[in-house]
Image (cartoon, rainbow, N blue to C red):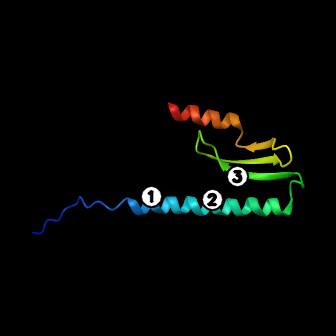
Amino acid sequence: MEVSSIDQAAPVAPAAASAFTDQAAQNREIVQAVKAVNSAELYGPNQELTYQQDTASKRMVVRVVDSTTKQVLVQIPPEYVLALAADLGKT
């Protein structure tokens, strides 16, 4: 009778690397979409779409910004949602 070990752990690193690669690819696609929207001036000549990571929540944020005054006109997700997510993450 042959007995083999059933505790053969599969490497976890490839899955983590795959998730990182998927996220990087998704970020590149979003950046390209933002550039396309800005070059088409879909929001007008004085407004632009921006895309950046919120430092506190580590979530991606899209904003419509007035390019002359740099005032944020619309933000997705809104600040209150980011604050709520940060608060939920602390508990």
- State left or right for residue 69 relative to residue 14: right
Q: Which residue is mark 1?
A: 16
Q: Earlier in the sequence, mark 3 or mark 1?
A: 1
The disc labelled 1 sits on which kind of residue? Answer: Ala
Pointer 3 and pointer 1: residues touching (CB < 8 Å)? no
Q: State the CA–CA distance, disc 1 to disc 2.
A: 17 Å
Question: How crowded is the residue under tag 1: few (<14 C-alpha within 10 Å), some, or many (20+)?
Answer: few
Residue at left offset 86%, top offset 47%: 68
Q: State the CA–CA distance, disc 3 to disc 1.
A: 24 Å
Element on which disc 3 rests: strand
Where's residue 75, x and y in %? 75, 43
Extreme residue toward the bottom, this view: 2
**Where, by quadrant of the figure, is residue 6 drawn?**
bottom left
The disc labelled 2 sits on which kind of residue? Answer: Asn
Q: Which residue is mark 3?
A: 51
Where's residue 67, x and y in %? 84, 49
Residue at left offset 51%, top offset 32%: 90
The disc labelled 3 sits on which kind of residue? Answer: Tyr
Query: Vertical placement of 6 versus 76: above or below?
Result: below
Q: Earlier in the sequence, mark 1 or mark 2?
A: 1
Q: Which residue is mark 2?
A: 27
Mark number displayed over residue 6: none
